[in-house]
Image (cartoon, rainbow, N blue to C red):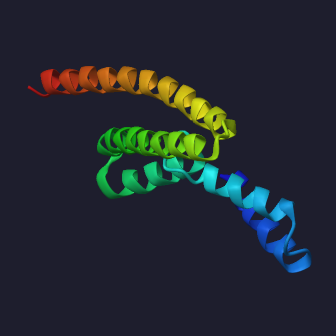
Amino acid sequence: MAGPFVNLIFIVFFLNIIPNTNFVYINILIFIFNMLTIYPLDGGRILKYILCILMGKIKAINLIHIISNITAIILSIITVIICITLRNIALLFTIIYIAIILFEENKKYKIKKEMYKILENYIAINKD
């Protein structure tokens, strides 16, 4: 979570010293990217911690999985529209990166979900 915080410091610092530089805009874009609610990006981690506090770990993990996938789908659609409209495929590499990390997280999610089921069954059996 230090990444977005450092970006904010750079944005505030350079806005006061040299307001219209590419450095400010780059840090704004990096901050926005990091704060996307796609787990394991920083925004997804922050949302997961908040949801864990509000609803417990298992429900939070299930919900952050759904939110991450929906956000990635929406972002993919927007990226495709921008790529077609502006005839620029540079954003396509970003969405490919997001797809790769989300694919890996979905595999981990399935494993975690199975482990929680086994643990719940074990607890239910030993409770009796």
Give the quadrant of the C terminus. top left
- Seen at 43% across and 26% down, the residue is 106
Front residue of 100 and 123: 100
Horizontal side, residue 27 vs residue 65: left or right:
right
Give above or below for 13 relative to 84. Answer: below
Residue 24 location, quadrant: bottom right
Q: Nearer the viewer, residue 118 or 67?
A: 67
Number of numbered discs overlaid on the protein picture:
0
Tell me the residue at 14%/21% (across/down). Answer: 125
Determine if residue 39 is in view.
no
Q: Name the quadrant containing residue 92.
A: top right
The percent position of residue 98, horizontal first and vertical second, equals 56, 34
Q: Residue 83: give x, y in percent of width and height.
A: 59, 41
Task: Note whether residue 54 is visible.
Answer: yes
Residue 15 percent location from the top left of the image? 82, 75
Specify the quadrant of the image occupied by residue 59. Answer: top left
- Look at 13% across and 28% down and name the residue there: 127
Which is more toward the observer, 40 or 115? 40
The vertical placement of 45 against 98, above or below, is: below
Seen as rendered, the residue at the extreme left is 128
In the rendering, at what x and y percent does residue 112 appear? Answer: 38, 25
Kindly give the residue lying farthest to the right in the view shown: 17
Q: Residue at x 73, y 65 (%)?
A: 8
